Image (cartoon, helix red, strand yellow):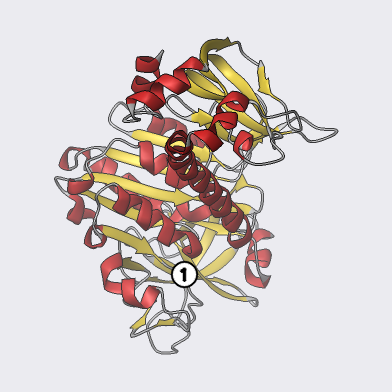
Amino acid sequence: MIPRPFRIERVRQEVAGCFSWYLKPVDGAPFKFLPGQFNMLYAPGVGEVAISASGDCRDQTTLVHTIRNVGAVTKAMAAMRAGAMVGVRGPFGSAWPVEAGYGKDVVFVTSTIGLAPLRPLIYEVLNRREKYGKVIINYGSRGTDDILFERDLHAWRGRFDLEVHVTVHTAQSGYRGRVGSVAAAIKIARFDGENAIAFICRSEALTRPAVQALQDRGMTTDRIYVTLERNMKCGIGFCGHCQFGPTFMCKEGPVYRFDTIEKIYMIREL
Amino acid sequence: MASLLVEQGFFASVPENVAATISELTSERKAGIDELLFRQGDRADHFYLVKSGLIAVELYAPGRDPIVVEHVYDGDVVGWSWLVAPYRWGFDARAVEPSSLIDIDAAALRERFPTDPILGYEVMRRFIPVMARRLSSARERLVECVTEPS
């Protein structure tokens, strides 16, 4: 696939080492995606990286991606400014099942930059708020200075129909917010584990503890969805770089229902 | 005080005679904002049940403000170093909000364990899950720091 040209309309520094691009298609045609899908972003002359969309999927004129500056390509991207041209291939991969949560309590479990791939889903759940029971967001960050999308979190916490738990790993003395683990926040969240659906996006090493914390609250793994991350290259299941057991993560993933991958998830050789 | 202990949650369903023994060693305590309950390195001879308020477990760091590593809320327990020799606090505990606490004389309680193994067992079976939960919480955050670079 040939990358479609987009122009960077705005660059927003989110937290240290993490920024968002607001992209406009040069041809003006709408860009459709579903929450949880990713695009291959191309920095001309440098390379491509797979990044999940982090904006509102109902806004088809502006594509938002939140990028962490960790490698050669993302380092080059961090240096690009508004007005620069980039390439976009996509959208690729599976989406969060928005309608699977109808009639259920919805629990989001995420930390650090994991909030970015979940944000389109949170927007969509809030757009359809009357379809769901309780909606709970459990978010963890390292400290009080690197809370991603803090403005969104403040806005969400200000709503009467949302429960938002923000927990930090450590804080300065006198801080009155929650200090501890995300799992501890799951423990105190008010939802009906027998009739809830959960969406997890965090470090894969910590996905399993999050699943366990949800199971402790009565949830079953057929109602828990996770998003995973691998080395996506082609984005269309040809190259095999993102193979995960019998699946290609760029096609069958990155969003999986946990019971469908539970067995292979713990196979260390994969 | 025995009924207060049982109602508080941490010692819920404890046998009556054990509740009676612990309640003999129990008093109520209020802590104002910024008041230290205990200090890293001091002898660990009390522990506290939080009835209401908010307690921060902090690490003293020379040359900078203390670092909060855990918050303890209503119904939870503050302090388990009194169970582990050499019985010195590993962290500071500070009230972040005006707090109402049940203060238990841990040194006296500890002394009774050798002659009252049921008491020791009932206390241990309540503290070990707290220790496991906090260890797990610390490990999760450690892993997140490694796997999610800032």
Which residue is rendered at x = 85% and y = 33% of the image?
B63
Residue A41 left/right relative to A164: right
Location of residue A36 by image quarter: bottom left
Q: Nearer the viewer, residue B30 or A176?
A: B30
Q: Does the rendering let one see residue A144?
A: no
Above or below, comparing residue B43 to residue A257 in the picture: above
Q: Does the rendering let one see residue B35?
A: yes
Q: Nearer the viewer, residue B111 or B148?
A: B111
Instruction: Tell me the kind of residue under disc 1.
Output: Glu
Residue carrying label 1: A229
Residue closest to the far front: B115
Q: Nearer the viewer, residue B118 or A92?
A: B118
Above or below, comparing residue A188 to residue A41 in the picture: above
Label 1: few (<14), some (14–19) or many (≥20) C-alpha neighbours in 10 Å: some
Which residue is rendered at x = 49% and y = 35% of the image?
A151
Rendered location of residue A100, percent (x, y): 18, 56
Which quarter of the figure is the N terminus of chain B placed in? Answer: top left
Which residue is rendered at x = 50% and y = 39% of the image?
A167
Location of residue A27 by image quarter: bottom left
Location of residue B80 by image quarter: top right
